[in-house]
Amino acid sequence: MKQSTRSILFSALFILVCSSVYAQNKTIKGVVKASDGFPLPGVTVLLKGTTTGTASDFDGNYEIAANTNDVLVFSFIGYTTKEVTVGESSTLNVTLDENLSQLEEVVVVGYGTQKKKEVTGAVAKVSADEIVKAPVADLGAAIQGKVAGVNIQAASGRPGESSNVQIRGLASVNGGQPLYIVDNIPQEGNPNIPPEQIESIDILKDGASAAIYGIRATGGVILITTKKGKSGNMKVDMSTYTGIQNITSGTPLMNTAEQLYALEVTTEQLGDEPLTFWFQPDALDYDTDFVNDVQNDNAIVQNANLNISGGLQDLTFNFATNYFKQDGVLINSGFNRLSNRITGQFSKGKFKAFATIGITTENRTQEPWSLYEYAIGQSPWSRPLSDIPSVGQNTVELDVGNEIFYSFLSRQLDNTDERETKSNNIALNLEYEVLDGLKYKLNLGRNEWNYFRKFFQPQYLALDRNGELNATASRPQALLDEDYIFTKRETIEHILNYSKSFGLHNLNLLGVMSYERFKSRTVGVGVVFDENASNDIQTLGAGAEGIKPNSYNINRTLAGKLARVQYNYNSKYLFSASYRRDGSSKFSSDNKYGDFYGFSAGWNVHEENWFNIPSVNSLKIRGSWAELGYEGVSDYSYQPVIETGINYPFGFDEDLQFGSVQRRYASDIFWETTVSKNIGIELSMFKNRLNITADYYQNDKKDMLLQQRIAPSSGTYQPRAAAQFNFININAGNMYNKGVEIAASYKNNFGDLKFNIAGTFTKNTNKVTDLNGVERGYANGRPIQSRGTNVEFTTFLAEGYEAGAFFLFQTDGILKSQAEVDEYTSSVDTRNLSTPRPGDMRYKDANGDGIIDDNDRVYSGSGQPEFEAGLNLNLKYKGFDFDVQAYYVGGTEIYNGAKLYAYGAGRHKDLLDMWSPQNPTSNIPTFRQDAFHSNFRAASDYFLEDGSYLRIRTLTLGYSIPNIEEMGLDRARVFLTSTNPFTFTSYTGYDPEVGGDGIFTRGVDSGSYPVTRQFMLGVQLGF
């Protein structure tokens, strides 16, 4: 009996223990939503009293192991923390209420963070979800049209090319991209981090916000926070997409029949007969589209991303790897990038540490120079590139009418132009709370960027149809050039931060001492190969003769001291002031240091007791004033530099002696200065569903660094480098940007249908107000590449106009008869034009001085838009999601250089309807078989077009697959995305998004690499 009792008791105890163990291993799942029904990603879910936890995914889903009696704590910034007992159910859905009194969205403001309601400057934040909506490799392209006041345009559509980013207009006529800060460490230019590895981007737009970064902040500051680990179970996220790219437009060209007809018309007017069949009897056998031959339509784009994160409450990690590959839509071009990043955080008591290491390898293959122009210029009756007969090793027969011009294209297609970039950036942030509220922080950073280019031009022997070598169309000896650039930037910052509250008074004091050192070494070497060498051997050691190497070493340093005070009274009255003193090695000891100040204030009106408007959740008015500097000149500009390589024959035997000389003059220059003023308002209404931010700003640029030309008698005009050394840098120019920017968003739901709509509007006015007595100068913007310095400039700096504005001759129709020619030549002096004839272009004598010359150029707009707008719409219905982004650019001009080239080559389809005695009413000028005839001069406004466009930037349809938990997945989503699916524009070139250098060549389409339309299919998985 006792044995039986013991057996029963033991069995009961065993069952109880097993039940307890089972309860501990219970898996709780659910969804965390806001009160409006939207899922909340990133919500922290912790077992109360422990460090065990997890975080909700993009759709608000979470999963955690817990006991029946455990309490789960759900917390998220801006929402009230909620505690829920697990209970018997394995499904626990939670709704968090917005804590409207907190408004605690954290914004990074440089050397720290602030609650959004306490920010006094113009600061914009872009979350990770917004960044990855556009499937692109470039960070700038990912946020185009999403931030008011931030203008982003593609420099070109070439794979791997970074966008031009301008924050509130031009920073300087010398360029001035924003300063990028990655995990508290300044970068040398765009860090080119994959969008998938970024947690958030905070953009400091006004001067007071950016002034804490001193001399490099005049173009604004972009603060990048990379993804960090979250405590809880290890989480694995994978995503991939694959797609194709298409060119959507181009330059219309004549086919063989049309070209032969046009040639007959033009030669008849010259009193001659075409000799096409004399030089090429088989001309009618071909109808070649050379532009299509150099295109690679339906080029592939691929992306794969992996992110692993997890850890304990005090120790977390995140590992991310991304591979992106994009084939070019022009042959012999492409880009791929492998980027890896690992971050770790540790905290114990008063000590915190953060470290990140990013390693990236990029490979680019670049298309041949002026590929598009050379393809346009080929006669359609010539043999296709793929059909050129080979008559021996490295030898081809060019049985075409013009072997030399044909070979400009054909021999480049065998070139090898490969570029490899390896970069790494390391950041270490250490923080210790010395006293209550007083923290010391040490930032250490090191960035390396190493570049290698291999440019091989193989031997190319061209025979004419008679089997004779055409030396001019050939390259008898192969050439190999290799270029290396090694750069390193090191940063150290000592930071003291004191934060304390005294009743309703809140104070934050910041002190920073920073030091940055930059080193760069450039090496270029090359060889010429023996005529009998094989093109398969492409090494320097195989060369028969060396090419003079070049090498440049650059060392510069930057030291700064910063003090900042931030104060608010009861989060109602806000104030911030900063002072920074920077010293740069780019300037002499007398001008090395600059002082920069920033002040801003804000008023949270809704915090006032008398403010009682139920529909308004928050209302803030803020304003700022600041002074910033810019060091936009090359290194060593302030001191004389002796340059080598100036060799000269001396002595009786005239032996070549090594020589050095000072090629350029130095000048004692100092900082450019920007004075920034801003006033803004922030409004949230209807339970924060509607949010509006509006700003008015003005940035005045003073003492701009200009390159002033000096007289030829100075001895600085060098052969084949006429514009390279004949200037000195001076501080002598003023310019301003002023404008309005508005951002608005509204979110709501109707049952299961949830929507979010957001829009931005920016209007910026740029004007040059002083050029040291020069009314118009500093020309640039040649619209054709391949014809070199024979092509006229189109853009200038001019007082009273935008930087890089078009100044062109105004056309006045066509001279349609000899009587009109006589009347025209009797009224104006046309000595600077080709001898006018019927069918030629008439140019206006704009200043009325009786002669057509450079003084008749007239302001004709610019590539800078008058305004731009973005619109984003997101819809969610059950498992489906739909996202569309539109982007509009208005009031911009584009110079169609490809059209100019096609006219000058006699290839454009418009020329079928050109003026001739048989077509005397035509308004299209006659082709005179002369590319430099004044009918088609680059300075003509005939080729200037309206560049305004409306573009559907992205179009995405996705579906999240339900009930996938049994498959071991937290999330599975498939999506179809199109980038640039529709573009509405009157521009007739490749694409209206022509960024160029952002200033002088912005809006100058010199056969620019086209921005493409893309279609992608992808999948996202979470484990």
Image: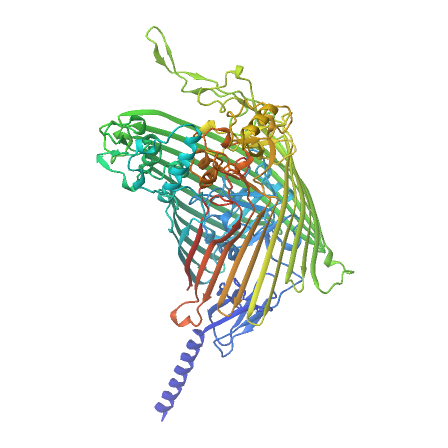
Asked if residue 157 can be seen in this view, the reply is yes
Task: Judge whether 756 appears above or below 988 on screen.
Answer: below
Above or below: residue 4 compared with residue 524: below
Residue lying at 58% horizontally and 46% vertically, measured from the top left = 150
Quadrant placement of the C terminus: bottom left
Whether 711 is drawn above or below 804: the answer is above
Q: Quadrant of the N terminus?
A: bottom left
Residue 1008 in the image, given as x and y percentages of width and height: 46, 40
- Residue at position x 58%, y 43% in the image: 892
Name the outermost residue toward the top: 652
Instruction: State the residue in front, 1004 or 920.
Output: 920
Viewer-closest of 469 and 8:
469
Rendering coords of residue 159 (x, y %): 42, 45
Which sits in the foreground, 945 or 525? 945
Toward the left, the furthest residue is: 392
Q: Quadrant of residue 275?
A: top left
Q: Where residue 295 appears, x then y in whole percent? A: 38, 45
